[in-house]
Amino acid sequence: MQRKHSEAHRGLFLVDNKGDAPLPSAIAGSSIGIIGSGNTGLALACYLSNQQHAVSILTRDKQKVQALSKFKQIGAEGRLEGSFPIQGITSDAEPFCASSEIIFVATVATAYRQVITNLIPHLRSGHKIVLFSSKFGGSLEVAKMIEDAGVKGVSVVETDALFACRAQADDYVAIKGIKQWTLFSAPKKSSTKQSAKFIQQFFPDLEEADNVIQRGITDFGAVAHPVTMLVNMNPIDRQEPFLFYVDGFTEKTVLLLEQMEKDFRSVAEAYDTSLIPMHELLKRYYGCEDCCLYNAIRTVPAYQTITAPSTLDHRYISEDVACTLVPLQQLAQKANVKTPMIDSVINIATILSGVDLSQSGRTLAKLGWADKTHKDIIRLINE
């Protein structure tokens, strides 16, 4: 059911949630296109509209097109409060690309190949693409697709989704938390530096990653989501409700997350970068107790009311395994690094899904690295 909007306004109430940073003041603007009308797409549209940017949305969801076309507003509650205007919403990529200087991709990472295939005929030199929930190496995959299609002059930069949010209706979103900090990267170090001023105009607290590998592993969701889904698979499969982060862990099950973190760290070290400890990462994201991972997870303000998925067929497995664990496993193999927890989760997820995720996921071939050596990859990312 849609919520009836009041007259459009740009109201921003900074709720005094522990650890949430003040949102940036409005920056007058650019023509922004957002691909995706789910949780993150709606939250991002409100955030950028609040900065006085002209925001349009591209979605395959005909119901969303109909619902949002009527008022051309999106309501938000929580960390961002108010009703925020959009320029329009369409399912046609051609006018969307023509009217958008900057394109944010706010879909699940498993949809990137379809999304970019749809965009390529309409991209032009000067377009900037921001992958807003990239997982591992999204900018590499997208840049390779665009280059293989012969399109020149399109820049691609990736970061992590910044919002803990849930859509309440087709035109209304609850924003439970906004990350205070995360990393961004382009495929190469030199292009990351070139992107810094551009990306930080929207998100001033984002920092440059050492390289695209560090950005890809700086992702608490990829460490936590698949393991948490698997250790709670019975209640999830029975559709028994529980709070995903508050009730989904015990001190014993957190040991599995810590092993996953060790695997991530081993890959980081093999490629000359570092991994921020997950408890510290949550502290930087949202604010929480960071004395240990178990307490950190249970004290993140934004996690207190997030419920578990009601199915194992969920992006917490399909996206995080296919688009982060698979390429990490293959990078580890290049460097002769063992990743026992990553291997185990990929194997179990493959059995549950009935899909060979090591083949269908974001392989090194899709990143353009299949024929590269360990040393080649280190050289490429640091150019």
Image: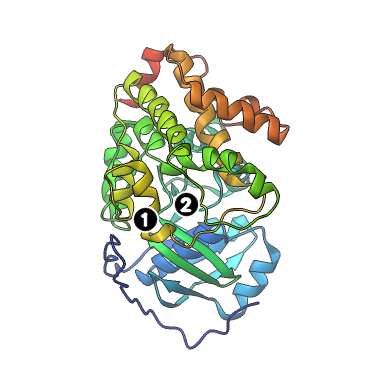
Q: Residue at x 29, y 67 (%)?
A: 27
Task: Using a 10 Å C-alpha cutoff, classify the residue at mark 1 as few (fewer than 14 neighbours), some (14 to 19) or many (20 or more).
Answer: many
Residue 281 drawn at (x, y percent): 32, 44
Quadrant placement of the C terminus: top left
Q: Is residue 289 left or right of residue 363?
A: left
Q: Amino acid at mark 1?
A: Val
Q: Is residue 224 left or right of residue 114?
A: left
Q: In this rendered view, identify the residue nearer to me: 23 or 243.
A: 243
Q: In this rendered view, identify the residue nearer to me: 13 or 11.
A: 13
Residue that protrudes farthest toward the right in the picture: 354
Looking at the image, residue 188 lies above or below residue 116: above
Residue 372 drawn at (x, y percent): 46, 15
Looking at the image, residue 121 lies above or below residue 39: above
**Of pointers 2 and 1, the one earlier in the residue sequence:** 2
Residue at the disc numbered 1:
300
In the picture, residue 266 is in which quadrant? top left
Residue 234 visible in the snapshot? yes
Q: Residue at x 28, y 51 (%)?
A: 289
At mark 2, the secondary structure is loop
Q: Are marks 2 and 1 in contact (CB under 8 Å)?
A: yes
Residue at the disc numbered 2:
245
Quadrant placement of the N terminus: bottom right
